[in-house]
Image (tube, rainbow, N blue to C red):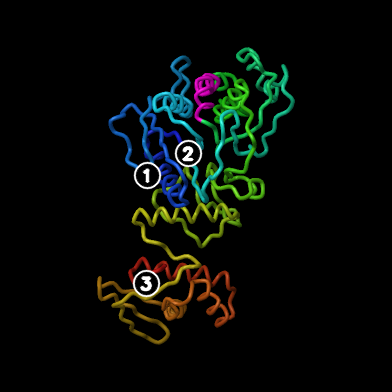
Amino acid sequence: MFYTVFSTNDSPYMQWQSDLLEHSWKRVGQEGVLIRLVATDKPDKLPLQKYAHCVATRLHDVNPDTGDAYVIYNKPASLLEWVFSDKPEGTVLLVDPDCVFRGPVTRRVTPGRPAGQDWIDFRVGPAGADSPFGLGDRFSFLNAHCARTDLSIAPVMIPTLIHTSDLRKICARWLQLCAIVRDHLRDAKGQKVWESDMFAYLAACAEYGLSHEPASLGICTNWDAARAPDCPVIHYCQPIAAADGTSIFSKFTYEPWKRIDTALEPQTDYGRDLVEIINDCATANGVPPVATSTSRPRWRDGVMEGRVLDEMLLENTANGGSIWLNGAGKAVWELCEGKLRIDEIGTVLSQRFAADRGAVVADVVRTVEALREAGFIDVN
């Protein structure tokens, strides 16, 4: 069996991410089953998912020994509970809630041979007393807690492919080491390190002799696209920006299910893919599509036109609405018969008025979107 597994709590912030992940999983036809582990103190009130199987696990976002509040403790704790209670057998694809599929993962792994996304820009050196597991002298505290820090590791991160038999071996130790890393490791600002679970995972795997094969499985949204080519998963841990640096999307501020404006071109191909997936999910949740440069706008039936000099009055007989169009708006309206894409309309009008095509296309997008919202145009 192939399992795609991710760990969450039951907060609204986790819910929309889970829905988006689930939508993308179904969209690409990912084989196997999708498991959402839900750390909760209300196991009788699990969230509803269309395709994912929700599994209630005990809440473990505060370390019971130290009182350290770290929501990611839930990940190894929930996985530990799942692998021993449900007794799954097969390949597990570990992802985080802020991941989406843009293609299926077809690779499988066998016991003792996990694979993981190469951790871009994080490298390890030779393992030794001054550098436990090759992680560097910042991790010297591990010498007091690990018997064999001379073991080497491969620097990998999620998405990770690991066999269920290996998960059963490492999860308890992973959880234990996570607390140790949190207790000792600090960043440049003196704060406990957010990636503590990632370092703990690597150390736990090394102790059990599990060496990962680095693979191109998922790209983080602050990486150069060339560093993880053809990867099927997008990890939107960082914002998506346009070519001019304008922020297009950030998980920290996103309002579900608001459609993302496609008039701004993302800097990367994975940025474009992510925007498409989010907007596709918005459509699936009943949010009408917005105008984009590739939309084909078409007049709605029942619209009456009234021309006054170079302007036009539109009246919607269905809802009684009306809108005035100036000369530029009138020129756009006249080309919205459903044959041309918006970028093609922009080409026609930029040639007609000897104007910059990019600026005209952006104006056409805004005009068509205003007409769509007012009920005069449909886009597809």
Of 302 and 186, nearer the camera is 302
Kindly check if marks 3 and 2 are in contact, taking CB atoms under 8 A apart as contact: no
Local packing at callout 3 (Cα closer than 10 Å; few below 14, some 14-19, many 20+) is: many
**Three-letter amino acid code at the position of disc 1:** Tyr
Q: Which residues are magenta?
A: 164-179
Residue at the spot 47% in from the left edge and 51% down from the top edge: 28
Local packing at callout 2 (Cα closer than 10 Å; few below 14, some 14-19, many 20+) is: many
Tell which tag, 3 or 2, sits nearer the viewer: 2
Image quadrant containing the C terminus: bottom left
Q: What predominant SS class does the magenta segment belong to?
A: helix
Tell which tag, 1 or 3, sits nearer the viewer: 1
Instruction: Identify whether 28 is placed above or below 296.
Output: above
* Label 3 residue SS: strand
Q: Which mark is residue 2?
A: 2
Q: Is residue 354 left or right of residue 331?
A: right
Residue at the spot 69% in from the left edge and 25% down from the top edge: 152
The residue singled out by tag 3 in the image is: 377
* Label 1 residue SS: loop
Marks 3 and 2, how far apart in space?
45 Å
**Three-letter amino acid code at the position of disc 2:** Phe
Marks 1 and 3, how far apart in space?
34 Å
Marks 1 and 2, how far apart in space?
15 Å
Q: Position of residue 284 (x, y in %)?
A: 37, 55
Q: Is residue 138 left or right of residue 263?
A: right
